[in-house]
Amino acid sequence: MSTMLKPEAAAPDQRGFHNLRWFMIGMIFLITVVNYIDRMTLGVLAPTIMEAFEMTNVEYSRVVTMFLIAYTISQTVSGKILDRIGTRVGMMCFVGLWTVSSMLHAAARSATQLAVFRFMLGLGEAGNWPGAAKSVAEWFPVRERAFAMAIFNSGASIGAVVAPPLIVWVALTWGWRYAFFIGATCSALVMLLWFLFYRTPDRHPRLSERERAHILSDHADTATATVSKTPWTSLFRHRQVWALITARFLTDPIWWFLISWLPAYLKNERGFSLALIGVLAWIPFLFADIGNLIGGGVSSLLIRHGWSVDRARKTVMFSSAALLPAGVAIVVLSHSDALALTGVSLIAFAYQSWIVNVITLPSDCFPKQDVGSVAGIGGTAAGIASIMFTLLIGWIVDNFSYTPVYLIVGAMAPTGALAFLAIMRRLERVG
């Protein structure tokens, strides 16, 4: 019996891949791209759908709010579920839910039905970020995590760039209802890939021993456990959780402002036509993707060159937070449309460089079996703040202009950075 087991035990080292972790993050990147295509389909088709259902702006805002409410609730719930049942099964459940929800949008016959399906979509899509954070913690050593997070997180920006032309083309060719099958079909295909290939490192039959050693080389927690037994409420005893909550509460609304209000700003304040918005509105999201990769890549590079995690993360985070108000100043003070778009692009670049390091903090500070829960708690704080700021934006723009909104955005990043520093003090592992 023992002789029969020896070849099997040696198999991973003989047949194994040496860079399997990058394939794993590639799958998560694809899932995130699809996540954003699904998410943005309603926004891109909003004028057509509002006309088809004879919806008022108030009714449409309620539909959008249903997504945000569900997304916020699910950020915490999904993180805990992922820590309980594991990354592989958990991600399949959440992507499956949003795939079905996306298809149901095509069957909606009223604003009420659309709101219900939007709520379901929010519950499913929220699981992507805690799941991705947990997967990165499982598959990457500390010195590579920020860059790995940047790769998957760039899927959001890529999805935001790809979605408008793709969705409009399908809607104009076959009708708006068919556009909701784009994301659903892609989700199903990526989940098949996930089912076939994703395993944790301790259970993957194709992982080489060399890469396994690399993954564990600077893990602070080398235990193979991936299911959490930590009481959820006990996580709030740690200052690291409160630092994450504060950072995301004070800065995440910046991103929701960009993805929800940029076309309206360009049309109402800058006089862009719909055609011109379609040609140019993707540019800030391209710079967001660049900022995401640079922010994650630089902090990972600094750690590989001997910097502490605390020093590397903070250097990039505070540099990014300081850069964002400069983008706001360009937008507010410039009379040139080109310069205004440049300023918005700088805001997007700086925000993504900041946030990619923020969302890496759960895996920096907590054992991998608790990463999903901590990431979910941070996502819930982000969702609550984004709902509040979204409602505030509408009131400010109706009564004043976009200028006060941009000024608030410019203050958010430095305020969030200073509050984070005051609470976190030194970035270190719990325990």
Image (cartoon, rainbow, N blue to C red):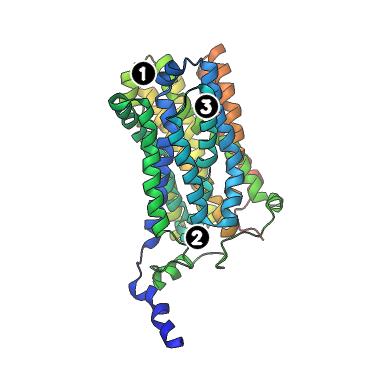
Q: Is residue 287 visible?
A: no
| Residue at which label 3 appears | 113
Residue 33 vertical placement versus 263 (above, below): below
x and y percentages locating residue 212 in the rendered image? 44, 69
Q: Residues within 10 Å of mark 3 (few under 14, many from 20)?
A: some
| Residue occupying image coordinates x 69% and y 49% | 236
Residue 120 vertical placement versus 341 (above, below): below
| Residue occupying image coordinates x 49% and y 16% | 55
Q: Which mark is residue 138?
A: 2
In the rendered image, the residue lying farthest to the left is 173
Q: Earlier in the sequence, mark 1 or mark 3?
A: 3
| Residue at which label 1 appears | 336
Q: Earlier in the sequence, mark 3 or mark 2?
A: 3
Q: Is residue 167 visible?
A: yes
At numbered mark 1, what does the secondary structure look like: helix, strand or loop? loop
Closer-to-camera residue (244/99) = 99
At numbered mark 3, what does the secondary structure look like: helix, strand or loop? helix
x and y percentages locating residue 249 in the rendered image? 60, 37
| Residue occupying image coordinates x 34% and y 16% | 273
Give the CA distance from mark 1 to mark 3: 43 Å
Give the CA distance from mark 3 to mark 2: 39 Å
Give the CA distance from mark 2 to mark 1: 47 Å
Closer-to-camera residue (77/241) = 77
Q: What is the tally of numbered marks visible in this picture?
A: 3
Q: Earlier in the sequence, mark 2 or mark 1?
A: 2
CB under 8 Å between callouts 3 and 2? Answer: no
At numbered mark 2, what does the secondary structure look like: helix, strand or loop? helix
In the rendered image, the residue lying farthest to the top is 399
Q: Residues within 10 Å of mark 2 (few under 14, many from 20)?
A: many
